[in-house]
Image (cartoon, helix red, strand yellow):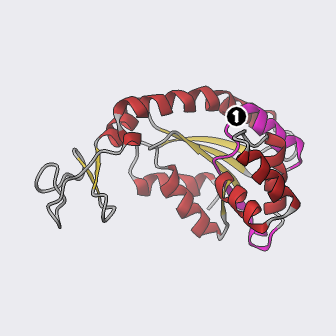
Amino acid sequence: MRIILLGSPGAGKGTQAKFLCEHYCIPQISTGDMLRAAVQANSPLGQQVQAIMASGALVPDEVIIKLVKQRILEQDCQQGFLLDGFPRTLPQAQALMDAGISLDAVIEIRVADEIIIQRLSGRRVHLTSGRVYHQDFHPSRIPGRDDETGEPLIQRIDDQADTVRHRLDVYHQQTTPLLKFYADLAAEQVAASPQFFSIDGNQAVEQVRATLLQLLGD
């Protein structure tokens, strides 16, 4: 099973990606992991990546595509893979298709922005232990204090409402054309075009999981 899983920050994509990878025995491939592995391997491509990153420039799409093609030839990808964080933009999606990398399904987990902001901005974290609370859904016994140590909880910068709104704006700008691209591709039903699904991420985690398996034919 070769899958791209899309979803805004806080939509529950990470939870479902972990489940799908375990269910289908496939690796979750992220661009960040690929870049780090290439640099660590000190391969010619890794040296190129390291030079680009050292200069402060963004790694070009064609280099990322080469890394993806190289990565999916490895043994653990024989049963498929789940791409995480790639493609992010329409040119990247087109480059992926032009490279002949076939996909079985592209799935969007869809959650309204207002709910995302509520989910993320309500998080509070105990930094030492990593314990996470939520002001509405999983509050600490004493507001603003960790249940076990009594130490203060903090709100991470990434979880602040203004930061979440900005992250959502960037996601929508990049991903709306991407969703249309894959929806149109699926509608054309050309050879090797992936199926495209958009599912309601407001459901319980278990229901989202059941919907995914149903759509993927399990």
**Extent of the magenta region:** 74-100
Task: Tell me the amino acid under the disc marked 1.
Answer: Thr
Point 63% across, 30% down: residue: 174
Q: Which quarter of the figure is the N terminus placed in? A: bottom right
Residue projecting furthest to the bottom: 75
Point 38% across, 51% down: residue: 204
Q: Nearer the viewer, residue 86 or 111?
A: 86
Instruction: Judge from the rendering whether residue 158 lies leftward or rightward of residue 63; answer left or right.
Output: left
Instruction: Judge from the rendering whether residue 167 lies leftward or rightward of residue 184; answer left or right.
Output: left
Is 163 situated above or below 77?
Answer: above
Point 74% across, 32% down: residue: 90
Total count of labels: 1
Q: Which quarter of the figure is the C terminus placed in? A: bottom right
The location of residue 123, given as percent across then percent down, is: 30, 46
Q: Which residue is mark 1?
A: 89
Residue projecting furthest to the front: 55
Q: Nearer the viewer, residue 32 or 52?
A: 52
Quarter of the image for residue 55 reads top right
Q: Is residue 124 magenta?
A: no
